[in-house]
Image (spheres, rainbow, N blue to C red):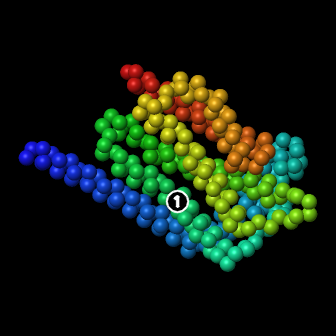
Amino acid sequence: MAMDQAHDEAHMGFLDHLEELRRRLFISVVAVLSAAIVLFVKKDWVFDAILFGPRNTEFISYRAWCALSHAIGSGDALCVERISYELINTTMLGNFSAHIIVSVVGGLIVAFPVLVHQGWAFVRPALKSGERNAARGAGLASSMLFMMGVAFGYYLIAPLSLQFLGNYELGDVASRIAVMSYVKTVASITLAAGLVFQLPVLVYFLSKAGLVTAPMLKAYRRHALVAILALSAVITPPDVTSQILVSMPVLLLYEMGIWIARRQDKRRTR
């Protein structure tokens, strides 16, 4: 009878965990859908002001590049004076599909702090008191890093990619870009940059679990440099300047990860 009672308690505990997981997932889905619906309704503002912002020569990034060009004495070398490519729709569902994708990706970005909070709330009861205190700011740090990555991707990587790929000339072929191609480029770059900026948080939890250490990260620093350059080549235009601009903050994040792992190593030693 004692064994049966223990089995029932364990079974109920497992079901309770499943119920809690279901509740956290439900809240997360509702948050994403709510943000996506709001963005879907605000279609004109989302597309004109945000998504198509890099197609305007007065975009803040272009004005910053132009100011930098004048400051270093290069004249208008970095100034964007015209956008030569145009967007077209080639399918019946093209515009609507683009609208859906933008709303969903935007909903994920806006609701990301809620997703992090729900994930942390689900894991938190299983942690010890010391582990809870040590990781108390992890959720806030993750959300801040994600938003910084999104901003980095939107204001730097996406404009560079659009200018290079959209204005790339091949004979007398005019650049008429399908709207879905444009949307996927901006959305994937922005979302990927936000996820890449989660590197310090990932290193924190891996070092907390003892899976990585500071000496290990130092030993693989050269390998990480090659991987970062390869990643930069994938998500940016194929020119050296763009790859260096993208790889620099990722390298800084890697160094931050080494510092975080070193702190965890010292605590584990103590």
Residue 95 on image: x %, y %: 66, 74
Element marked by disc 1: helix
Task: Tell me the quarter of the image containing the C terminus.
Answer: top left
Which residue is most to the bottom?
Answer: 92
173 above or below 118? below
Question: Which residue is more in the foreground, 242 or 82?
Answer: 242
Identify the residue at horizontal 56%, vertical 72% (top origin). 40
| Drawn side of residue 44 relative to residue 260, left or right | right
Find disc 1 in the rendering and name its residue: 108
Residue 126 on image: x %, y %: 31, 43
Residue 142 on image: x %, y %: 49, 46
Which residue is most to the left?
Answer: 1
Residue 208 on image: x %, y %: 42, 33
Identify the residue at horizontal 69%, vertical 43% (top origin). 232
Identify the residue at horizontal 35%, vertical 46% (top origin). 123
The 10 Å Cα crowd at callout 1, few under 14, some 14 to 19, many 20 or more, is many
